C-alpha cells in the first residue's frame, strides 16, 4: 500500500512541477468562466440584450457548457495518461524500476490513478470556472436563474468524472503496451471521431449512436430532445436508461481493457525491446508472412527515389538541399503508423458521415460534391488539422526525441532551411490528404453513375478554401512547437488555442481581425465569379499568414535547444543569432500584419452595421406619435430597375400610386426605406419633410394640401444600393445572379404591423397595401435573363443593356421578387400551361423533379380549388449565398441554388426535396395569395399549415402512403424539436405567430392530416375550397374563421378534436403496458392488451391532466409486417384489458401509426407480443 | 583556437566555468578532470552548441560564437552520448548528416561516405540500422559522421567510455591517425589514453583550468618528487618528511601501493619513481583542494 501511494504521489508530483500543467488548470478555468460570462454579455454589455432562454446556469446549460470542453479534456487525457504509460520508457528508467520488487498492481494502479487525480483537478477547475461565472458581478439578472448545485453534481458524476476514468484507462493501457505516446493521440482522435460517425448507423440501429457515444452527450440529449425551454430551465436532468447503458457500457469497456492490459503486463517482458505489438507479432503463427510484409514494406520505403534536380539554376537558393531534407523527413513520417492510422480514421469518418448526409433519411440524394464539401469535408479538415499539430511536433522534436540533436544541430545550413524543410513536409502531407479527399469525392460520384462528375468544385474548394486555412495553422503549429520543450506541451497549447478560437465568437468577439480562423468553410455559388468569392477569403488568410510568419521567425530564434529550455539560455541564443536580415523580415511581416489588419478593420467599419437593440427601441419610441395616424395605401407600382452586377449595385426608380382609403383627410405621411439601401422621395405636389432618421431610413412628410378620402397621388422614389466594400456587398447581388425582394422598396406607416390600431390594419404582410398592380422594367447586361412577377410585355435595348418589361395581369399582394441570372430555361407543359425552370447551366439535373412537383400540385389543386391564376409558372434559381429558402411571388417561385444541388434519385419513391419545394410553393398561389390572412395571430395557419397539409397529400398521391408516413414523421420531429427552442409561451395553433414555424408547419400539417383522416380528404378539401372562395381579398380572414367553419360544417363528434387541436395546446401520451398472445384450441390467436394513455393541456401557463376522451387506433401486424387487423379502441375501454381474436399469428402491435395524436414519444408505441 | 575569459553559471547557481583562458594549438589536446569539472560544458561551447555567459572563442581570426556556421564548416564533433534515428541505416543517416554539413552534391556525398565507412571499418554494415549497432560500432559510426566534412577541428567527448580494451585501442589508433594537420580536443577519465596520444593536456576542476602544458612539461615539473611505497598490513612506517599521498592502489595479501608527492623521501622505504600523467592529475587536484 505504501508503494502504491508513493507511486501515485510521484506521478502527481511529476506533473505539478511542470508549468504547463498550471497552464491547463488556469486555461480550463478561464475558458469555462469566459464562456459563461461571455454568453451572458459581460464583454458586450449592449442594453437590451434579450434574456437567456434557458438560463445560463440551468442544469441543461451547465451540462452543455461542460460538454463543450469534452474535446479539450480528451486531448489533455491523451497527454497526461498517454505520457504516464510511456514515461519510464521515454526517460529510460524502466530498466531500473522494473528490476525492483514493486508489484504490478501497485505500479499500474499508482500510475493510472495519479494521472486520474491530475485530470480530475482540471475538470474541477472547469466547473469552478462556470460556478464563478454565475457569481460574477455585472451579469444581467435575466441571464441567470436560481443557483443549483445539483446541476454541477449531475454533470460531474454522470459525465466529467466517468469520462475521465474511461478515457484515461483506455489511453493509459494503449500507450503502456505500445510504448508510444502516439497511440494515445490516435485513440483520442478515434474516440472523438466515433461520435461523428455513429449517427451514420442510426438508420440500422437508431439507438446505436446514442448508447455508443464515448462522451455520453448523445444519451443525455436523447432524453431531453423534446424538452421545452421551461423544462430545460427548471427540471433536473434525467438519467434514464440510455444514459445508464451508455455509462455502463464504457465503464465496463474501460475496466475490461484495464484488467486485460494489466494481466498481460509483465515487468520482465516489458524490459525487453519492443512493445506489445512487437511481442504479439513474435507470437503469431503468421510471423513469416508478417516479416515478409515488413521486409517488402521497408524495401518499398528504401526505393522511394531521391528526386533528381538540376542544381545549376537553383543552387543559389539551395533548394535541392531543402528538397532532399524534406524527402528524408517525409520518409520518416510516412513510416509512422500513427500517420496512417489518423489519416485512415479521417477518411473513414469522411465516408461514413458523407454517407449519412447523402442518405439523409428519409431524403435520398445522389452523390453531390457540394454536400460532401459541407459537413463531411469540414470534419475531414479538422482531422487534418489535428494531424498537422501532430506531425509538426514530430518533425520539430524528432531530433531531441532520438537524442541526435547534438549531431544535427551542427549543421551549416542557413537558419531558414531546416524550418523550411519541416514546413514543406507538413504542407506536402496536407496537400496529399486533400488530393485524396478530392479523389474520393470524384470517385464517389463516378461510382454512383454520374457520367460528368463535378471535378472543379472539389478541387477549388480543397486547395483554395481548406488548404490556406491549414497552411496558416501549420505555420502556427510550427511556431508553437519550436517554443515548446516537449511534443505534448506543444500539442496541448495548440489544442487549447484551437478550442479558444472557436469559443471567441460565442463570447462576443466578432471582429475579423481578432478571429484566428477556427474553421475552413465557405458557401460557394455558381452565380459568383471565383475571384469575388475567394479573394476576400484569401485576403483574410493572408492577414493571418503574415502574423504566423512573424511568430514563426520569432519562435525559431527562441526555440528550445538540446541544452534545456530555460528562457535565459534561449534569449542568449536568440540575441546571438539575430542579424539585420532577420530583423528586416520581422519588421516586414509585422508591418504587413498591422497594415493588412487595419485595411480589413476599415473595410468592416465602412460596411453595413445593423442598428443595435437600444437604437431600435429609441427609434420605435420616436415613431409612437405616428402610430395611430392614418396613411394611404398603395394601389399601383411602376418600377424601373437597373442592375449592375459587375459593380454589385442596383438602382430603382419607382412610382407608387397612393390612395386615401379612410374617411378623413391625410396630410402627414411616414415613409420608410430599407436598411441596406439609400432611398429618396419626391412628390408632385408641394410637401415638406418634418422628420428624418437617416439610420432607420425614415422620413415624415407633410403635404401642403391634404389627401382627401378616395383621392389619389403619386409618390416618386429612388433607391440606390449601398456601396460595396471588399468584404461586403449588398445582400441581393452577386456577379451573375441577382435576387431583389420587395423589402428594398419603401413602405408607408408605422413599421410594426401587429401594433397598429385595428382601423389601420390590412393583411398579415402589409398595412400599406391590399393588392397592387405591378409593372416592372428591368435593365441589365445582355448576358443576364431578367424575371419579375407577371407576363413579359415588352423588350428593348438601351445602349448596351437589355430591358424587359413585366406586367401583372391582375393585382397581386405586396410580396414580389426580381431576379436576374445567366439562366438556362427548361420548359414543360401542364395542359397548355407552360412550366418553366430557370436554372444555372450546370444545375439542370433537378429540373425534371421540380417540374414533376409543379405538375402534381396543379393536378391536385385543379380538383378542389379555383384555376391557377397566371399564364405560366416559373421556378427560378437564385444564388445560394443569398439564402437557402424557397418562396412564391405570383407566378415566380424563387428557389435557392442549394436546393438545385440536390439531385434526388428519381427511380425511388422518396422524400424528394425539390418535388416537395415546388409543390409547396405552388400551393401558396391559393393559400397565401388567394387567401390572404389578416394581420392577426394565426395567419401562418392559413398559409403554411394548409399549404403543408396539401403538400403532404400531393406527396402521398405521387409516392404512396409510405412516403406520406415518412413526411408525417418529419413533421412530428419538426414540431417537437421546435418546441425545445420556443422562448415564449407556445400558443394554440390558431394563434401561431411569426417565428413559430415549428407550429405552423409541424403541428399544423399533422393536425390537418389527422382531420383529413377523420373526415375524409375530399370532404376536408372541399371545405377548404369553400373557405377560399368566401375569403378573397380584401376580405382578410383569421384562423379562427376557418376553425369556426369546420365546427359549423362538420358533425358534432369532431368538435372536441377541433377545439383540442386548433384552440388549445394539448399533448397526448400513449404507451403499451402489456400485450400477450395465446393460441387457442381452435387454431385462432387471442391477444390481450393493456394501454396506458394520458392527455395534458396547458391551462394558464401550467400543464394539467385532462380526461382522455378520444378513441385510439391500433394496428396489428404479422411477422412480415402486413396488417392483420385495424381497430379503434374507444376511450372508455382503454383502462380495461381487452381481447382481440385473429386467424393468423400476430407479431406486434402499434398504437396510432398515422400520428393522429400529438405524442412526443413514439418509441413506446410498438410492442412485440409475448406468449 | 583561443578561449578567452569563458564563464558559465547554470540556473541554481552552479558555476560550470570560471574565467577559462586557453589556447589550443594543432595537435591533440587532452582535457582531463573529475566529474562535474566542466569538461562537457567547455566542449559544447567549443562546438557552438552552448553559449558562455561572458567571454569569447576565437578561431582563425573570427569569433565562433558570432559566426557558428562558419566554424561548423571545419568542425567535427562526437558527443559523449548520442542517439540515432530508429530504423535508419548507417548509410542513409550519414547521407542525412552530410547534407546538414553542407555536402549538397550526391556524388560527393557518396564518395565521402564510402571513405569514412572504410576508415572506421563499417563498410560491411552500412545497410544495417544504426540503432542495432553495438557500443563500439556506434562509436565508430560517431567518428565516421564527424569525418564527413573533413574537419580541421575535432572535438570528441569521452570517446572510449564503455569500450572494451580492444575497441578502445582501435579507437585511439584511429584518433592518432586523424591528428595529422588537425586539431583534436578530447576529454577522458582514462589518463593512459592521454599518455599515448596527447600533445597537450589541460586539467579542469570545478570550472577552473588548473594546468595547460605538454605532458612532458607537466611530468618534468614533478621529476624527483614522486615516491612509491608499499605498505604491508599491520606495519607502520616512520615518516621522515611531509608529503602528499597522490594515489593508492591495492595489491595482493592486503598490500597497498602508495604514490607520494614530496620534496624529499617521506619514508625511508620509499622509492623514487618517474612521474606519470596520473601523478600530474592528482597533484593538480590536490593543489585545488581535492583530496584522494
Image (spheres, coloured by chain):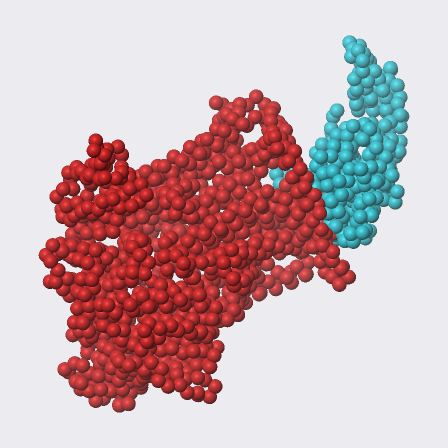
Q: In the image shown, does B101 or A1094 lie closer to the viewer?
A: A1094
In this rendering, the answer to whether A668 lies above or below A980 is: below
Direction from residue A837 to residue A459 in the image, left or right: right
Report x, y in % for residue B129: 72, 38
Chain letter, colour cyan: B
Q: In the image shown, does A598 or A354 lie closer to the viewer?
A: A354
Hey, which quadrant is residue A122 in on the image? Answer: top left
Report x, y in % for residue A630: 19, 78
Q: In the image shown, does A838 or B126 lie closer to the viewer?
A: A838
Chain letter, colour red: A
Report x, y in % for residue B96: 73, 47
Direction from residue A582 to residue A349 in the image, left or right: left
Hey, which quadrant is residue A1002 in on the image? Answer: bottom left
Report x, y in % for residue B174: 84, 37
- What is the residue that sits farthest to the top in this orientation? B234
Q: In the image shown, does A12 or A425 lie closer to the viewer?
A: A425
In this rendering, the answer to whether A675 lies above or below A109 is: below
Total numbered labels? 0
| Residue located 32% across and 75% down the image | A833
Quarter of the C terminus of chain A within the rendering? top left
| Residue located 15% across and 38% down the image | A1136
In this rendering, the answer to whether B250 lies above or below A552 is: above
Direction from residue A23 to residue A244 in the image, left or right: left
On the question of residue A316 being in view, the answer is: no
| Residue located 89% across and 28% down the image | B223
In this rendering, the answer to whether B285 lies above or below A80 is: above
On the question of residue A804 being in view, the answer is: yes
| Residue located 17% across and 45% down the image | A1129
Amino acid at each position: 500500500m505504501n508503494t502504491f501511494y508513493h507511486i501515485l504521489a510521484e506521478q502527481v508530483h511529476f506533473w505539478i512541477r511542470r508549468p504547463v500543467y498550471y497552464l491547463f488548470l488556469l486555461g480550463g478555468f478561464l475558458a469555462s468562466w469566459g464562456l459563461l460570462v461571455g454568453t451572458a454579455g459581460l464583454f458586450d454589455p449592449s442594453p437590451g440584450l434579450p434574456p437567456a432562454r434557458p438560463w445560463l446556469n440551468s442544469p441543461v446549460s451547465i451540462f452543455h457548457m461542460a460538454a463543450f470542453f469534452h474535446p479539450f479534456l480528451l486531448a489533455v487525457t491523451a497527454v497526461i495518461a498517454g505520457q504516464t504509460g510511456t514515461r519510464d520508457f521515454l526517460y529510460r528508467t524502466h530498466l531500473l524500476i522494473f528490476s525492483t520488487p514493486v508489484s504490478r498492481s501497485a505500479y499500474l494502479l499508482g500510475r493510472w490513478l495519479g494521472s486520474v487525480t491530475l485530470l480530475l483537478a482540471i475538470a474541477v477547475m472547469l466547473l469552478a470556472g462556470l460556478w464563478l461565472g454565475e457569481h460574477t458581478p455585472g451579469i444581467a439578472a435575466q441571464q441567470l436563474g436560481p443557483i443549483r448545485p445539483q446541476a454541477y453534481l449531475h454533470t460531474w458524476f454522470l459525465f466529467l468524472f466517468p469520462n475521465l476514468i474511461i478515457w484515461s484507462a483506455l489511453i493509459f493501457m494503449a500507450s503502456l503496451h505500445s510504448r508510444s505516446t502516439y497511440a494515445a493521440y490516435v485513440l483520442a482522435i478515434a474516440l472523438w471521431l466515433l461520435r461523428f460517425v455513429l449517427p451514420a448507423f442510426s438508420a440500422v440501429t437508431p439507438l446505436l449512436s446514442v448508447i455508443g457515444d464515448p462522451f455520453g452527450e448523445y444519451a443525455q440529449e436523447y432524453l431531453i430532445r423534446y424538452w421545452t425551454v421551461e423544462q430545460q430551465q427548471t427540471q433536473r436532468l434525467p438519467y434514464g436508461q440510455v444514459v445508464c447503458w451508455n455509462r455502463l457500457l464504457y465503464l465496463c469497456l474501460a475496466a475490461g481493457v484495464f484488467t486485460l492490459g494489466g494481466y498481460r503486463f509483465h515487468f520482465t517482458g516489458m524490459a525487453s525491446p519492443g512493445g506489445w505489438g512487437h511481442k504479439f507479432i513474435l507470437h503469431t503463427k503468421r510471423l513469416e508472412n508478417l516479416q515478409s510484409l515488413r521486409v517488402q514494406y521497408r524495401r518499398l520505403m528504401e526505393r522511394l527515389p531521391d528526386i533528381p534536380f538540376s542544381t545549376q539554376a537553383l543552387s543559389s537558393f539551395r533548394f535541392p538541399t531543402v528538397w532532399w531534407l524534406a524527402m528524408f523527413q517525409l520518409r520518416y513520417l510516412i513510416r509512422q503508423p500513427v500517420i496512417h492510422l489518423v489519416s485512415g480514421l479521417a477518411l473513414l469518418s469522411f465516408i461514413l458521415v458523407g454517407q449519412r448526409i447523402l442518405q439523409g433519411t428519409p431524403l435520398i440524394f445522389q452523390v453531390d460534391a457540394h454536400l460532401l464539401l459541407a459537413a463531411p469535408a469540414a470534419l475531414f479538415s479538422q482531422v487534418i488539422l489535428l494531424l498537422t499539430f501532430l506531425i509538426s511536433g514530430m518533425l520539430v522534436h524528432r531530433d531531441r526525441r532520438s537524442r541526435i540533436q547534438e549531431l544535427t544541430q551542427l549543421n551549416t545550413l542557413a537558419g531558414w532551411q531546416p524550418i523550411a524543410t519541416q514546413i514543406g513536409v507538413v504542407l506536402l502531407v496536407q496537400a496529399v490528404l486533400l488530393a485524396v479527399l478530392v479523389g474520393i469525392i470524384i470517385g464517389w460520384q463516378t461510382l454512383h453513375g454520374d457520367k460528368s462528375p463535378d471535378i472543379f468544385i472539389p478541387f477549388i474548394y480543397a486547395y483554395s478554401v481548406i488548404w490556406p486555412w491549414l497552411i496558416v495553422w501549420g505555420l502556427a503549429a510550427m511556431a508553437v512547437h519550436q517554443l515548446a520543450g516537449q511534443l505534448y506541451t506543444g500539442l496541448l497549447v495548440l489544442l487549447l488555442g484551437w478550442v479558444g478560437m472557436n469559443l471567441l465568437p460565442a463570447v462576443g468577439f466578432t471582429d475579423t481581425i481578432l478571429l484566428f480562423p477556427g474553421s475552413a468553410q465557405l458557401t460557394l455559388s455558381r452565380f459568383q465569379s471565383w475571384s469575388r468569392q475567394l479573394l476576400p477569403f484569401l485576403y483574410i488568410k493572408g492577414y493571418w499568414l503574415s502574423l504566423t510568419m512573424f511568430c514563426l521567425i520569432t519562435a525559431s530564434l527562441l526555440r528550445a535547444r538540446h541544452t534545456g529550455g530555460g528562457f535565459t539560455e534561449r534569449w542568449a541564443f536568440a540575441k546571438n543569432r539575430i542579424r539585420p536580415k532577420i530583423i528586416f523580415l520581422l519588421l516586414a511581416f509585422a508591418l504587413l500584419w498591422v497594415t493588412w489588419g487595419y485595411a480589413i478593420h476599415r473595410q468592416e467599419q465602412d460596411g453595413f452595421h445593423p442598428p443595435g437593440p437600444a437604437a431600435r427601441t429609441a427609434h420605435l419610441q420616436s415613431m409612437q406619435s405616428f402610430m395611430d395616424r392614418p396613411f394611404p395605401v398603395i394601389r399601383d407600382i411602376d418600377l424601373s430597375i437597373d442592375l449592375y452586377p459587375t459593380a454589385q449595385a442596383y438602382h430603382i426608380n419607382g412610382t407608387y400610386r397612393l390612395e386615401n382609403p379612410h374617411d378623413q383627410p391625410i396630410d402627414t405621411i411616414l415613409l420608410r426605406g430599407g436598411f441596406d439601401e439609400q432611398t429618396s422621395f419626391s412628390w408632385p405636389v408641394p410637401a415638406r419633410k418634418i422628420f428624418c432618421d437617416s439610420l432607420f431610413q425614415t422620413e415624415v412628410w407633410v403635404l401642403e394640401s391634404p389627401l382627401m378620402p378616395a383621392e389619389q397621388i403619386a409618390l416618386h422614389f429612388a433607391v440606390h444600393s449601398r456601396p460595396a466594400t471588399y468584404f461586403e456587398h449588398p445582400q441581393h447581388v452577386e456577379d451573375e445572379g441577382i435576387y431583389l425582394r420587395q423589402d428594398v422598396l419603401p413602405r408607408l406607416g408605422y413599421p410594426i404591423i401587429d401594433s397598429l390600431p385595428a382601423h389601420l390594419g390590412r393583411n398579415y404582410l402589409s398595412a400599406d397595401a391590399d393588392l397592387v398592380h405591378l409593372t416592372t422594367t428591368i435593365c441589365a447586361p445582355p448576358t443576364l435573363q431578367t424575371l419579375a412577377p407577371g407576363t413579359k410585355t415588352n423588350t428593348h435595348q438601351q445602349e448596351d443593356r437589355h430591358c424587359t418589361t413585366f406586367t401583372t395581369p391582375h393585382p397581386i399582394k405586396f410580396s414580389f421578387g426580381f431576379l436576374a441570372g445567366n439562366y438556362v430555361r427548361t420548359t414543360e407543359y401542364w395542359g397548355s400551361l407552360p412550366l418553366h425552370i430557370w436554372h444555372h447551366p450546370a444545375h439542370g439535373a433537378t429540373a425534371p423533379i421540380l417540374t414533376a412537383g409543379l405538375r402534381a400540385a396543379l393536378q391536385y389543386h385543379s380538383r378542389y380549388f379555383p384555376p391557377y391564376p397566371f399564364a405560366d409558372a416559373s421556378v427560378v434559381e437564385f444564388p445560394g449565398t443569398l439564402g437557402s429558402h424557397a418562396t412564391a411571388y405570383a407566378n415566380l417561385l424563387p428557389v435557392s441554388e442549394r436546393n438545385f444541388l440536390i439531385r434526388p434519385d428519381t427511380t425511388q419513391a422518396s422524400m424528394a426535396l425539390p418535388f416537395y419545394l415546388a409543390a409547396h410553393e405552388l400551393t401558396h398561389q391559393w393559400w397565401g395569395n388567394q387567401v390572404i390572412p389578416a394581420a392577426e395571430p394565426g395567419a401562418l395557419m392559413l398559409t403554411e399549415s394548409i399549404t403543408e397539409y396539401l403538400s403532404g397529400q400531393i406527396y402521398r398521391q405521387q409516392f404512396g402512403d409510405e412516403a406520406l408516413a415518412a413526411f408525417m414523421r418529419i413533421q412530428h420531429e419538426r414540431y417537437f424539436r421546435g418546441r425545445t427552442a420556443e422562448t415564449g409561451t407556445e400558443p394554440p395553433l390558431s394563434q401561431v405567430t411569426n417565428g413559430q414555424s415549428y407550429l405552423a408547419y409541424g403541428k399544423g400539417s399533422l393536425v390537418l392530416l389527422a382531420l383529413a383522416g377523420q373526415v375524409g380528404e375530399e370532404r376536408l378539401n372541399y371545405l377548404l375550397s369553400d373557405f377560399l372562395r368566401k375569403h378573397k381579398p380584401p376580405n382578410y380572414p383569421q384562423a379562427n374563421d376557418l376553425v369556426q367553419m369546420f365546427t359549423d360544417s362538420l358533425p358534432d363528434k369532431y368538435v372536441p378534436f377541433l377545439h383540442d387541436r386548433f384552440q388549445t395546446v394539448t399533448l397526448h401520451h400513449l404507451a403499451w403496458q402489456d400485450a400477450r398472445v395465446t393460441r387457442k384450441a381452435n387454431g385462432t390467436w387471442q391477444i390481450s392488451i393493456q394501454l396506458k394513455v394520458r392527455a395534458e393541456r396547458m391551462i394558464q401557463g401550467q400543464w394539467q391532466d385532462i380526461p382522455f376522451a378520444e378513441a385510439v387506433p391500433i394496428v396489428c401486424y404479422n411477422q412480415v409486417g402486413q396488417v392483420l387487423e385495424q381497430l379503434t379502441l374507444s376511450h372508455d375501454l382503454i383502462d380495461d384489458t381487452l381481447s382481440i381474436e385473429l386467424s393468423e399469428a400476430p407479431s406486434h402491435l402499434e398504437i396510432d401509426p398515422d400520428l393522429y395524436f400529438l405524442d412526443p414519444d413514439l418509441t413506446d408505441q410498438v410492442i412485440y407480443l409475448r406468449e | 583556437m583561443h578561449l578567452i575569459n569563458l564563464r558559465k553559471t547554470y540556473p541554481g547557481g552552479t558555476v560550470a566555468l570560471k574565467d577559462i583562458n586557453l589556447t589550443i594549438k594543432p595537435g591533440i589536446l587532452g582535457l582531463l578532470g573529475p566529474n562535474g569539472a566542466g569538461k562537457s560544458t567547455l566542449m559544447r561551447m567549443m562546438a557552438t552548441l552552448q553559449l558562455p555567459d561572458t567571454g569569447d572563442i576565437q578561431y582563425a581570426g573570427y569569433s565562433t560564437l558570432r559566426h557558428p556556421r562558419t566554424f561548423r564548416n571545419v568542425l567535427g564533433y562526437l558527443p559523449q552520448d548520442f542517439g540515432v534515428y530508429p530504423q535508419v541505416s548507417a548509410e542513409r543517416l550519414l547521407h542525412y548528416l552530410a547534407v546538414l554539413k553542407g555536402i549538397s552534391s550526391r556524388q560527393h556525398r557518396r564518395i565521402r561516405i564510402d571513405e569514412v565507412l572504410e576508415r572506421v571499418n563499417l563498410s560491411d554494415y552500412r545497410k544495417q540500422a544504426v540503432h542495432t549497432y553495438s557500443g563500439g560500432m556506434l562509436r565508430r559510426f560517431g567518428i565516421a559522421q564527424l569525418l564527413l566534412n573533413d574537419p580541421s577541428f575535432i572535438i570528441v567527448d569521452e570517446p572510449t567510455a564503455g569500450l572494451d580494451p580492444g575497441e578502445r585501442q582501435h579507437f585511439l589508433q584511429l584518433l592518432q591517425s586523424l591528428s595529422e594537420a588537425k586539431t583534436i580536443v578530447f576529454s577522458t577519465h582514462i589518463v593512459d589514453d592521454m599518455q599515448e596520444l596527447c600533445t597537450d593536456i589541460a586539467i579542469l576542476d570545478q570550472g577552473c583550468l588548473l594546468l595547460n602544458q605538454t605532458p612532458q612539461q607537466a611530468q618534468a615539473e614533478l621529476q624527483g618528487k614522486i615516491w612509491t611505497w608499499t605498505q604491508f598490513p599491520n606495519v607502520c612506517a616512520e615518516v621522515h618528511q611531509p608529503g602528499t599521498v597522490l594515489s593508492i592502489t591495492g595489491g595482493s595479501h592486503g598490500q597497498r601501493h602508495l604514490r607520494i608527492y614530496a620534496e624529499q623521501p617521506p619514508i625511508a622505504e620509499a622509492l623514487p619513481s618517474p612521474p606519470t600523467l596520473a601523478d600530474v592529475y592528482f597533484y593538480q587536484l590536490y593543489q585545488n583542494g581535492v583530496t584522494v
